[in-house]
Amino acid sequence: MNSLMSNSTGTDIVIIGSINADLTAKVQRHPDPRETLLGRGGVVSAGGKGANQAVAAAQLMPKPP
């Protein structure tokens, strides 16, 4: 089995899940039902359950000497 990520103990970690691009923007108020507002200051960040789990697993792995 090919591993996507291995740590120094030889334990394989395989994560199956999603990776998404989260788009966040500021609006001056909450929209009314069925209303569309224009946002400002958009920010794109990584997200998704699988991506978050992969980052957490990588942070738990031993660092190389």
Image: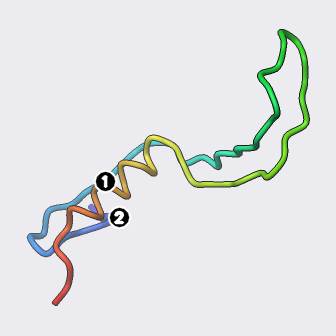
The image shows residue 37 at horizontal and vertical percentages of: 89, 29
Per the rendering, the mark at residue 4 is 2
Distance (Cα) linking label 2 and label 1: 6 Å
Amino acid tagged 1: Val
Check disc 1 and report the residue beneath it: 14
The residue at the far bottom in this view is: 65
The residue at the far top in this view is: 33
On screen, residue 17 above or below 60: above
The image shows residue 20 at horizontal and vertical percentages of: 60, 46
* Label tally: 2
Relative to 16, is 8 on the left or the right? left
Relative to 30, is 7 on the left or the right? left
Q: Residue at x 27, y 64 (%)?
A: 59
* Label 2 crowd (10 A; few <14 / some 14-19 / many >=20): few
Reading the chain from its start, which is encountered first: label 2 or label 1? 2
Relative to 39, is 47 on the left or the right? left
On screen, residue 1 above or below 28: below
Per the rendering, the mark at residue 34 is none
The image shows residue 26 at horizontal and vertical percentages of: 76, 41
In depth, the one of 32 and 19 nearer the eye is 32
The image shows residue 40 at horizontal and vertical percentages of: 84, 47
Q: Residue at x 30, y 66 (%)?
A: 5
Query: In which quadrant of the rendered view does residue 61 lie?
Result: bottom left
Q: Are dots 2 and 1 in contact, CB under 8 Å?
A: yes
Looking at the rendered structure, the secondary structure element under dot 1 is loop
Query: In which quadrant of the rendered view does residue 1 lie?
Result: bottom left
In depth, the one of 30 and 10 nearer the eye is 30
In depth, the one of 34 and 5 nearer the eye is 34
Q: Residue at x 16, y 73 (%)?
A: 62
On screen, residue 41 above or below 48: below
